[in-house]
Amino acid sequence: MLDGCVPWPEELAERYRAEGYWAAETLDVLLSAGARRHPDRTALVAADGTRFTWAELDAWADRIAAGLVAAGLVAQDRVLVQLPNVPEFVALFFGLLRAQVLPVLALPAHRESEIVPLCELSEAVAYFIAEDDGAGYDYRDLARTVVKAMPSVRQVFVVGDPAEFLPLPSADPVELPAADPFAPALFLLSGGTTGTPKLIPRTHTDYLYNARASAEVSGFSADTVYLVALPAAHNFALASPGLLGAMSTGGSVVLAPDPSADTAFELIERERVTVTAVVPPIALLWMDVVDFMDADLSTLELLQVGGAKFNPEPAARVRETLGCDLQQVFGMAEGLLNFTRLDDTDELKITTQGAPLCPADELLIVDEEGEPVAPGESGELLTRGPYTLRGYYRAAEHNARAFTDDGFYRSGDVVRQLPSGHLIVEGRRKDQINRGGEKIPAEELENHLLAHPAVHDAAVVGMPDEVMGERTCAFVVVKGEAPTLREVTAFLRERGVAAYKLPDRLEVLESFPQTKVGKVSKVALVRLLTGENG
Ligand code: OOB
């Protein structure tokens, strides 16, 4: 096992193998087996209509793998991958798997303040970017900042014009040794609750289970045409079931550069897409505009919604507005996935966030003292299982708090469970804002705010919002003249904070309300915004 990763205890590993959840296969089988079985079928379609057969994608991944080796990358090296939804993402992903180089999957929205700490934590030796994001942002500028701050990043590879950097590696295919199926294959980013990023090691076998089992409960088949509307680097769009799930059943994958209705509807019509996954604000947007757009969405069978709570009222309108079935997905990069099932009643599909994916998923719902609540009562969800991490990468101290002694991950989500096993997400017991599915660790943003010369103290909370679920409000106590929201966001941008983390509202207070033990009371701060008395 890679240094800094926490393995599953041997007796559980034995059980997961014996019960068939852990196959002795690597993730690469998703591409290699497909290429053998149906080389000439379409595997991947880019937004511009460029198509790749399974054989072409397979050969491309082989050339990239050989190129990585020729560029001096070796097994177990970590590299930062930050690509938009382009075909190179998929080819590189499999190329890296074949070379046993471990990708850290950053989001396209990330900037210097996220990328540099990720490079530091992972000791990344290379950084993969696209020339731009298609909307005018030049990642080569970001790379210049990153390599200056992180000399350990020896090489930058660029999809598009590399400028002073390197093009995507490519060389004549070579024989490469097979990876250990039970070793880490990639790192996902945690939504996070603290001031520093956390990395989630996912092994070949656990992630393969994640993708295959998700594909099965989502009814994927060889006829599935999956639209990647969310960032491909996010667990939902990558493997829950996402593009890897679609590949596992021999389906095809269509890449959308963004999830706007204009872009997505055109691709759904053109490529006869059957299923896609979105966050609630996108589902709301699609439902709002579908009547005004003359797109043919008749091939769309299933809309998967997750990442944040999808309220029953809009959930009930999916079928009549978009003409497809709804599947709610409550998942986390850390592992556990919950899905409503295709044969569930409408009631369950509309009012719950689904039931656990795997029979071996263990769930505990506990009160503030860590004691199990009575059945049906709400409490914090703790979980362990065959595809849920046992520890963040190189984070021993944090792991001691984030996991129980017997290895349950403390999700920080407040849920209640119905007798059917379905969960209803009721809230959160973690210091994070969920802004329409995008996660903002409060402490991280507070630290950035505290760096502002006029800010004496800062506390960030989520304020309820019809469309986004929550938006971000920064409360500050100032020294001297209070800055405006515009000044604060300009300051944060200057520090290289991702746009989705910028506060939507700024409130200046004389002092912060406190809890009985003298901590800042975020509950009281939210009440100041909503006007509720407590
Ligand atoms: C997905 O993964 P992450 O890692 O971005 O965020 C996980 C957190 C959960 O702990 C929960 O707080 C929230 O996002 N969440 C939901 C939810 N789905 C995720 N809260 C309420 N209702 C839902 N349906 O967000 C993710 C990963 C794989 C599949 C789907 C979502």
Image (cartoon, grey):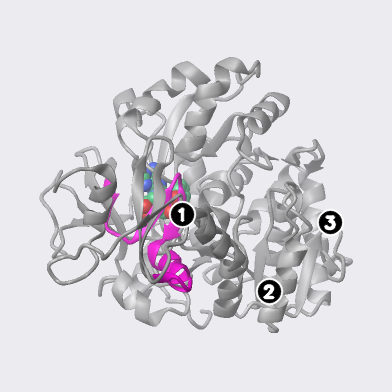
Question: How far across and how far down the image is residue 4, in percent?
Answer: 48, 81
Residue nearer the viewer, 517 or 366:
517
Q: Are marks 1 and 3 in contact (CB under 8 Å)?
A: no
Up the image or down, 126 lies above or below 256; here it is below
Q: Would you identify the image quadrant in which residue 308 lies?
A: top left
- Residue at the disc numbered 2: 146
- Residue at the disc numbered 1: 503
Up the image or down, 452 lies above or below 53; here it is below
Res 140 label: none
Question: How far across and how far down the image is residue 182, in percent?
Answer: 52, 69
**Left or right: 457 as drawn, with respect to 379:** right
- Is tag 2's residue or tag 1's residue first in the polypeptide sequence? 2
Residue nearer the viewer, 16 or 522:
522
**Residue 443 within the segment the image draws in magenta:** yes
- Residue at the disc numbered 3: 160
Q: Secondary structure at mark 2?
A: helix
User: How many C-alpha atoms fall within 10 Å of the one at disc 1: few (<14), some, or many (≥20)?
Assistant: many
**Magenta segment boundaries in residue numbering:** 426-455
Looking at the image, which residue is at 64% across and 41% down? 258
Q: Are marks 2 and 3 in contact (CB under 8 Å)?
A: no
- Is tag 1's residue or tag 3's residue first in the polypeptide sequence? 3
Looking at the image, which residue is at 30% across and 60% down? 509
Label 2 CB sits under 8 Å from any ligand 1 atom: no
